Amino acid sequence: MKIIASRENPAFKAWKKLAQSGRERKKQGQTLLEGVHLVESWHTAYGMPICLLASERGQARAEIADWLAAGARQGVECAVLTDALFAELADTETPSGLLAVVNLPDAREPPAPDADSLLLDGVQDPGNLGSLLRTAAATGFAQVLLSADCASPWSPKTLRAGQGAQFQLRLYENADLPAFLGAFQGTSLATALDGAKSLYAAELGQAPLAWVFGAEGQGVSPDVLVAAQKRIRIPMPGAKTVESLNVGHAAAVCLFESLRRRRVV
């Protein structure tokens, strides 16, 4: 088992760039997964990572030792880092002891114009983005389009917030949302305040749905809003000083209401 104790190690330098730089992740087509849960979720969806990294303390845990042993049997690069070096790669204050390097999945086909879809317009907070992806996976909205100014779904913070939801979804970054809405073969709905109909009074139908959510504060951008067929608001009769819901909460309300209308049990 390779032991790495120096910050000058070339492999460690490469992993640190992946941990800290979105540009590097995009350039290399790779990212880091942290924790046993994410590694297990990745393995279920795609198979073994290309590299497994453990901390000195972490390798003593049975479940991490099992992953290292399984990786070694399958020819996966495995390494143990000093606890101090591992902490420089980890995204959590209390590192779990296991990291994996993986190749980012490719969206091999263009987004389907007749599939339930979640469109995200300028959602820049990684925590909110991760929550949105978890809701999409939970409700079966497996196609997600992200505008160019969204946070990366593959950053360590978004991956941690998504808890593996990314591996169940077809993700399209830098998507042209108005163009997709123009070709969508279903009903498109954007959350808005002005000129919007109550979610509970609006006709959703059984056709494929494309739900559009924007960043907190700015909301859905004008060009995307115009391209959507319907504007929807979530009634908040109890709110006196609250202007809007968190975008993750708003999406959960709308997507699960879509399921309720379809009587999914």
Image (tube, helix red, strand yellow):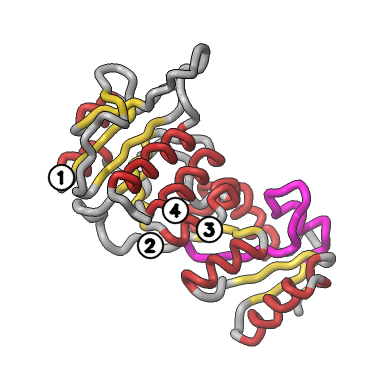
In this view, 93 is above or below 15 = above
Q: Secondary structure at mark 2?
A: loop
Q: Is residue 10 visible?
A: no
Point out the image quarter for the C terminus: bottom left
Q: Amino acid at mark 2?
A: Asp
Give the residue drawn at x 59%, y 68%.
40
Q: Please tell me which residue lies in front, 234 or 88.
A: 234
Q: Which residue is mark 1?
A: 183
User: What residue would you read off at disc 2?
Assistant: 106
Q: Is residue 131 left or right of residue 57?
A: left
Query: Closer to the observer: label 2 or label 4?
Result: 4
Residue at mark 4: 138
The residue under the point 53% across, 47% down is: 22
**The quadrant where residue 1 appears:** bottom right
Marks 4 and 1, how far apart in space? 26 Å
User: Is 61 left or right of 99, judged from the image as shown?
Assistant: right
Mark 3 residue element: loop
Upstream in sequence: badge 1 or badge 3? 3
Residue that carries the numbered disc 3 in the rendered image: 164
User: Given this view, does label 3 or label 2 mark the residue nearer the observer?
Assistant: 3
Alpha carbon distance from label 1 to label 3: 30 Å
Q: Which residues are magenta?
A: 81-104
x%, y% of residue 41?
55, 66
Residue 103 at x, y = what percent?
A: 49, 65
Dot in front, 4 or 3: 4
Nearest to the eye among marks 2 and 1: give it.
1
Distance from label 4 to label 3 (Cα)?
11 Å
